[in-house]
Image (cartoon, helix red, strand yellow):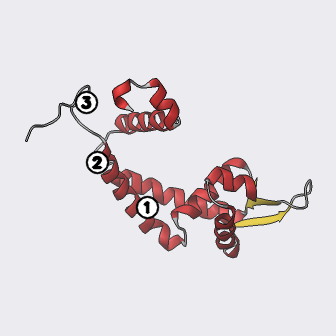
Amino acid sequence: MTSLPVLNQPPHRCGALLDHLSRRMRLRSESVLAPLGLRPRHLIALTVLRDLGGSSQQDLAKTLQMDGTNVVGLLNDLETENLIERRRSTVDRRRHVVELTGVGAKLLARAEFALAAVEDEVLCGLSGGQREQLYELLHQATSKTEVEACTEAAPPTC
């Protein structure tokens, strides 16, 4: 059997290693979030709400790239635990504004503290400078849309 030549490829491929690292990070993260009563999707929604200072349900659905029905279920979970508050918009009574409560902000801070420890554990083989470099590289790799990245890349890459 003849093998096809691989042109212009780096000597090492990152996909499998990124997947393995992601899996380790996800499993450890889920294990520290569970005792707090949080799932990753809860954490993401709370973080977005904190960073935005609140949001309409519709805008939150767009930001999270979730169907509106699924966002309602997610918000129901968070509201039941008093982590968020939904109220009618004073500008448009048809819309709901969602904001993080004080309880939600405190739980988010606890979760982020626990997740920082997970990151320290999973990335313990890297120095502080290497971790910062990894962050910058990952941020750079994810900052462009797939179309933008493929347009700028050499033809064999995409």
In the rendering, at what x and y percent does residue 103 appear? 68, 66
Q: Which residue is at a point 34% across and 47% down the rendered structure image?
A: 18
Q: Which residue is at a point 52% across and 67% down the rendered structure image?
A: 39
Q: Quadrant of residue 57?
A: bottom right
Q: Secondary structure at mark 1?
A: helix
In the rendering, at what x and y percent does residue 12 appear? 23, 36
In the rendering, at what x and y percent does residue 157 appear? 36, 30
Establish if 158 lies above or below 52: above
Q: Earlier in the sequence, mark 1 or mark 3?
A: 3
10 Å crowding of disc 1: few (<14), some (14-19), many (20+): many
CA gap, disc 1 to disc 3?
31 Å
Q: Which residue is at a point 49% across and 66% down the rendered structure image?
A: 33
CA gap, disc 2 to disc 1?
20 Å
* Residue under label 1: 29
Q: Quadrant of residue 134?
A: top left
Q: Earlier in the sequence, mark 2 or mark 3?
A: 3
Establish if 81 lies above or below 145: below
> Which residue in the rendered view is the most extreme toward the bottom?
80
Q: Nearer the viewer, residue 89 or 80?
A: 89
Label 2 is placed on what type of residue?
Ala
Image quarter hosting the N terminus? top left
Q: Quadrant of residue 47?
A: bottom right
87 left or right of 35? right
Q: Which mark is residue 16?
A: 2
Question: Is residue 60 among the parts visible in the rendering?
Answer: yes
Label 1 is placed on what type of residue?
Ser
In the rendering, at what x and y percent does residue 83 appear? 68, 67
Q: Which mark is residue 10?
A: 3
Label 3 is placed on what type of residue?
Pro
Task: State yes or no: discs 1 and 3 in contact (Cβ < 8 Å).
Answer: no
